[in-house]
Each structure stands twice: as structure tokens, then as C-alpha cells.
Amino acid sequence: MPVRRLMHYITAAVAATMVLAGCSGNGGTTPVVVGEAKRGGSVTVAEVNAFSSFNPYSADGNTDINSKIGHITHSGFYYLDDAARVVRNDKFGRYEKVSDEPLKVRYTVNEGVKWSDGEAVDAGDLLLSWAAGSGYFDDADPAAGTGTKYFSVASDTSGLAGTVLPEIGSDGRSITLEYAKPYADWEVAFDVGLPAHVVAAKGGLNDEEDLIELITDSPRGDVEEPAANTPLKRVSDFWNSGFDAKTLPDDPSVYLSSGPYIVRDIVPEVSMTLVRNRDYVWGQEPWLDEINVRFTGALPTAVDALRNGQADIISPQPSAGTDELFAGLADQGATIERYNQSGYDHLDLKFSGPFADEDVREAFLKTVPRQAIVDAVVGDLLPEAKPLDSHVFLPAQPKYNDSVKNNGSSDYAEVDIEEAKALLAGDTPTIRILYNRDNPNRAAAFSLIRDSAALAGFQVVDAGQGSADWVRALGSDDYDAALLGWIGTSAGVSRVPQIFRTGAGSNFNGFSDGDADKAMEQLTGTSDLGKQDALLVEIDKRIWESAYGLPLYQTVGSTAFSARVAGVKTSSGPLGVWWNVWDWRLAQPASPR
């Protein structure tokens, strides 16, 4: 499911970004790899959602599949392992804190690191990533309808927004960020994003040097005195949408790679082929020469592909009553894993249209049959599955129960049609719900909500779209409520302001609460874990009190892979099995002696 970003986090705060998602479990037999594996070969991976953008850092491009492909076609200073630990990539470059007061961090790309067209990854790329991730030039005032928001990033900008214009190193491969105040997530706040020389050329500039000059010479945005910056607007417009593509662009500069793999072919909404980047030596060397990705959608299609040898690795989205589909896979030597993901599905209400009235929001939420949705979607996948009762914590986190006791979630523990009718006072609002029609779990949730809300007088309209399109409608005026999911990691706390801060890139429903904003500002400014937890509890309560929407359930992940492959290791975060793609290899059978 898409993931606007929430946590991953592949460029500025990819590691702390929530991605729209549109522990190992039991079952299966782990294949024993005997003999010495050889480099080369290809595998096929089945993915739920279709690819739509080579820019996974933008609000529209921040989906799970786009982030996975971005991860293996881009390199950076670090990545997160399956336990959400930061692993620095010293072969790519280094970053180091050079001062605590003020907080200064220097990033340096190693010599020889380059894009697949031969251009060096350098200070211009770092500067562009900072410009996009900081919101430094924005002067938009949404309430007044004045000014401009330039780069539409999915990640939270409040951290990098606290930096001054970076200092470019004399080597041309480094920049230094200086924060005006402490920032808790500084270690995962920044990384390389898109190729600056391409964005410059496509944005109407002569070359990357012109882009560097434009960024360094442009004044910081001032909401009180907005000033149009036409050259920067052209550049940011291309950054925002110029990398979107469902098929392979005619211009290869739009899909350059700095990572272990390069995209070679795309069949729209069907498949993608990636081949090994032969020049890549600034990270772990991959084993496989080729990776094929099939966009399979529903779980039965993915399981059939694995059973029939048309896929080697699958990560379908399970739902209640689907366990029998996996029957027999273990007998074929497949490994099957089931686990809790670090993500959740939820229903968000827009703070406009019919839901501008808080009574209407509360009435609608009173009609949502959360336990019935859990039974239909999660069912027997988890014992005694219950609705999720927090917007910021997952059940395994220590502060979950403490927050749930006082956050107001108990007001929506049960469906209350009579109370909903009383709040509506005879009105029969029409509510358009946006969701991914190709996702059976979302379709099931929509049907249950529609039928229950009708009992109180709501007229619920299906505003769903296909898997490659629905995410682009988020934030538009084409719907009143949305069914979606976030998946992230436990690295950092920036995922919370990314979604809930006023005007944030992934705040699609217009939620704005001054007290919550203040708490989020404090949250990102402290590294004290106890204070972070206390602030998260406060933020959770403010969100519930606003009738923002409802968390529905923690998502359950499933991974299965054939005995043909080895090196596959599942993460509960946004990248799933893709986090260590360089370790994937063909398993070697035992050799006779």
C-alpha cells in the first residue's frame, strides 16, 4: 500500500519518513544452502502495488513500491537494517558531527561515486536534497492563499528547516549543515536524493552550477513578505512531478541510478526489470545480475506465482481466511514468514466539506465498525486481534497502554448509531471515501463502513481508484475521507510531525492543532526518550480529541520465498525484504563427493 512517505525514508529523513503502505512468523522450512554460491543469475519478486515514480521522496511518489525501487537504485550515507539500526555506508561517504553548540554535521561524498550517466555525485546533489527537504524557500500561507510552497516533499521539513544555508566544502563533494537548535533525529535527517544536474537541465537552467548559484543566492522564504522566485519554481515543479512515470521514460536521465541496480524496462502496472549497475563499487556488491518485479495485486495471484515458479519471493498483504492459500508451499521447500509490520491502516477525515463540522466528524466515527473490520481483514492471522487505539504508538511499544487509557479512544470503542443520529440532528451528509480499489483489505473496510454509516443517515460514495493512481488524489478536493496506511521504522520521531504537523507534507486532511504543533516541536528537539514518550502521549490525546479519524489495525506482513533463493531477510519496516537486496543470491544444491 502506498506510503507517503511515513518513515522510509530514503532521502531526507527516509529513515524517519512514513511511507504510504497501501519479527519472523511461523511455518515453512528454511532451506539449507550447501556449496558455494556464484554471483549472477536473476530472481523474480511479486509486489502488491504498481510502480509510479522515480522520485520516492515527493508527496505523490512516496509509496511503498516506489521507495523499494528507490532504495536499490540510489545510494547514500546510511541505511537501516532489519532491526531499524543505522548502518553507515563508508564506501559511499561519511558524515560526522563537528559541533554540538551549535549542532553542525558535515557530509562528504567519496571520490568516484557517480550517477549511471557518469556524472559525479557531489555537493550540488547534496544542496538540492537540502533545499527540497528543508522547505527553506517556502513562503506560502495556506489560510491567506498567498506565497509559494516549492518542493512537495513527503518527509517532515521541520528538522532541516532549522538549518541555515549550508556551507559547501572546497572539495566540491561536501556540505555542512548547521542547526539553530538541537534536533533529535539529526543522524537520519538527511541523505542524497535526486541528481542535481538533471533537475537543473529539466528545470530550465544551463547546468548544475546554475542550480547551486540559484539555491545559494535565493533569500529564505518569508510568509510575511512572499516573493515569487520563478526560476526556483520551475526547478521545484520538475522535482515534484518530472520523475513520475508508469513506463520507462524515453529520456534515461529521468531514471539514473547511483545504487546497485538500474531500471531497464517497465510494463505499465504489470512488471519491471532491473539489472546490476556494473560501475557500482561504493556499497555492498550485489550477487544477482537481474531482478524482475511483478505487480500482482491480490494475495492469491502472488501465492500462485510462487507455487508455479513464476516468482521466487513474494510479500503479499494477507487477510483473514487466506492461510489455506499457502498450503503445500513448505512441502516445496519454501520459507513462509508471518509478522507484525511497523505500520497500520486507518481512516482519516478531511477538515473541510461536510467534515468541517466537528459534530459530523464525531457522528461518522461513531458509525465505524472497527472490530468488524479487524475480524474481516486480520481475523485469524493474529490471536484475539483488536482495533488499534493509538495514532502514534503500536501495541508492542511500552507507552501504548498508558496512552490508550486517557487518549479518548474509548469514545469510539463500539458502534453507536443512535448517538451518531443525535449528532447529525436529521442531516444526511454525503461522504466520498478514497481508497485503493485494487487492495481487497481496503475494499472490505470500505464496504463495512458504508453499510454501517448508512444506518445513521450518511450517504457514502465510493471514490476509490486503482493502485497506481489513488495516492495522487490524497490532499485533493475529490474526497472527504480516506482509507490508507502508513508503514515506517522505529528510527527517530520525525514520522509524527510528518503526518500531523500543520502544513506538513504528508498532512493530507488539513489537521491543525496549535498545542499539538508545540508538542511536536519539542518532540523533535529532545533526544530524551522519556520526554519523547510523554510528548507522544500528549500528541495522541490531541489527535483523538479533534475527531481526526480512526486507527483501524496494525498491519500483518507475510513473506514467502522459494528454495531457489538465499540471503532473504525480512524487515518489519517499509522496505520489507528489500533492505538487504545485495545479499540475495541463488541457492546452490549439494554437490556429490
Image (spheres, rainbow, N blue to C red):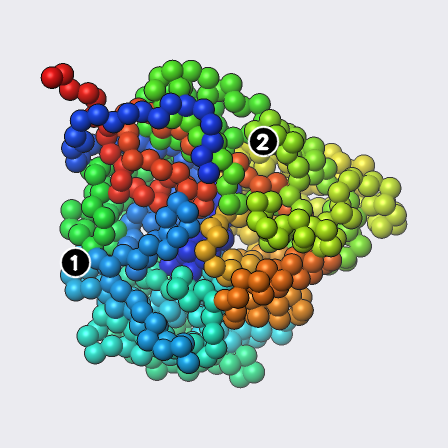
Position above or below: 382 against 580: above
Q: Which residue in the protein does label 2 denote?
A: 382
Position above or below: 487 against 88: above
Say which element carries label 2: loop
Label 1: few (<14), some or many (≥20) within 10 Å?
Answer: few
- 102 or 295, nearer to the observer: 102
Label 2: few (<14), some or many (≥20) within 10 Å?
Answer: some
State which quadrant residue 128 falls in.
Answer: bottom left
Q: Can you give x and y, in whole percent of width and height, for residue 112 in the image?
A: 15, 61
> What whole-number distance in Å separates the C-alpha atoms at marks 1 and 2?
49 Å
Q: Is residue 347 visible?
A: no
Of tags 1 and 2, the one toward the viewer is: 2
State which quadrant residue 294 falls in.
Answer: top left
Q: Is residue 283 visible?
A: yes
Q: Residue furthest left?
A: 593
Amino acid at dot 1: Gly
Q: Residue at point 70% right, 33% down?
A: 372
Q: Is residue 100 left or right of residue 589?
A: right
Q: Residue at point 18% right, 26% down?
A: 35
Q: Residue at point 66% right, 70% down?
A: 514
Amino acid at dot 2: Leu
Q: Which residue in the protein does label 1 denote?
A: 118
Q: Can you give x and y, in whole percent of width and height, for residue 509 in the image?
A: 62, 56
Residue 315: assigned label? none
